[in-house]
Amino acid sequence: MMNKKYAAQEELSVGEASSRSGLPVSTIHFYESKGLISSQRNNGNHRRYKRGVLRKLAVIKVAQKTGIPLEEIKQAMSQLSNDKTITAEDWNNLAEQWRTDLNKRINQLTRLRDILGSCIGCGCLSVDECKLFNPKDSVAVNGPGAYYLDPNVHLGDE
C-alpha cells in the first residue's frame, strides 16, 4: 500500500528521497555533485527533487552493482530528462548500452578466474620471472599492465 504522505508529493526533500530510496543523504548529495541527478532550490534554499529521482537513484545503484563506473552512468543518464521518470523502455536502452561492456568484463574476469590458480600454483610468486606466463620477463617490452588478462592484446611471438 502506498504511503499517503508521499502519494501526492511532486517534489521530495533530500530526507524524503533518502528515506524512500534507502540511500544516505550524503550519497544523494554525492550523486548530485557528480551530475548524476539534480534538484531545484525552494524559497528557503532547500533542495527539492522531482519524484522521478527515485527511479534514477535505483538505476544508479543497479548500474554501480554491476561495476559500471559513475562517469559511464552519468553519460548514459544525461540522455534522460531530469523531470522525466525513467520508463521500462528507458531502462532497456540504458541496459543495452552497458551490455557489451559488461560482457567484455565478464570474459576478462572469467579468464582471470581460470588462470589465477595456475599462476599461484607454480609456487614462484614472481611476476617478473614467472616461467609459465612471462619467461625471462619477455612481456616487459610491451610496457606495464596485465597483458595476459586482456584477450584483445596480441603479444607477438611468445
Image (cartoon, rainbow, N blue to C red):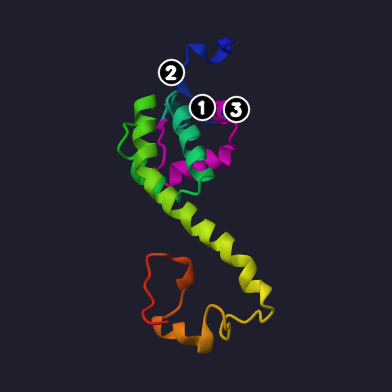
Image coordinates of residue 46 in percent, x first then y, are 48, 31
Q: Is residue 87 visible?
A: no
Circle 1 crowding by C-alpha within 10 Å: few under 14, some 14–19, many from 20: some
Q: Name which residue lies at 52% across and 89% down.
A: 136
- Asked where in the image residue 98 lies, by quadrant, the reply is top left
Query: At numbered mark 2, what does the secondary structure look like: helix, strand or loop?
Result: loop
Mark on residue 10? 2
Image coordinates of residue 48 in percent, x first then y, are 45, 28
User: Identity of the amino acid at label 1?
Assistant: Ser
Image coordinates of residue 90 in percent, x first then y, are 35, 30
User: Identity of the amino acid at label 2?
Assistant: Glu
Q: Is residue 29 left or right of residue 81?
A: right
Q: Is residue 23 magenta?
A: yes
- Please name the residue that numbered disc 3 is placed on: 19
Cβ–Cβ below 8 Å for labels 2 and 3? no
Query: At numbered mark 3, what does the secondary structure look like: helix, strand or loop?
Result: helix
Q: Name which residue lies at 50% across and 33% down.
A: 58
User: Which of labels 1 and 3 is toward the front?
Assistant: 3
Mark on residue 13? 1
The majority secondary structure of the magenta stretch comes to: helix
Magenta residue span: 16-40
In primary-sequence order, the first of circles 1 and 3 is 1
Cβ–Cβ below 8 Å for labels 1 and 3? no
Task: Specify the quadrant that holds the C terminus.
Answer: bottom left
Counting the numbered discs, the total is: 3
Query: At numbered mark 1, what does the secondary structure look like: helix, strand or loop?
Result: loop
User: Measured along the vertical axis of the image, is residue 152 above or below residue 137?
Assistant: above
Q: Is residue 43 magenta?
A: no
Circle 2 crowding by C-alpha within 10 Å: few under 14, some 14–19, many from 20: few
Q: Name which residue lies at 45% across and 72% down.
A: 147
User: Identity of the amino acid at label 3?
Assistant: Ser
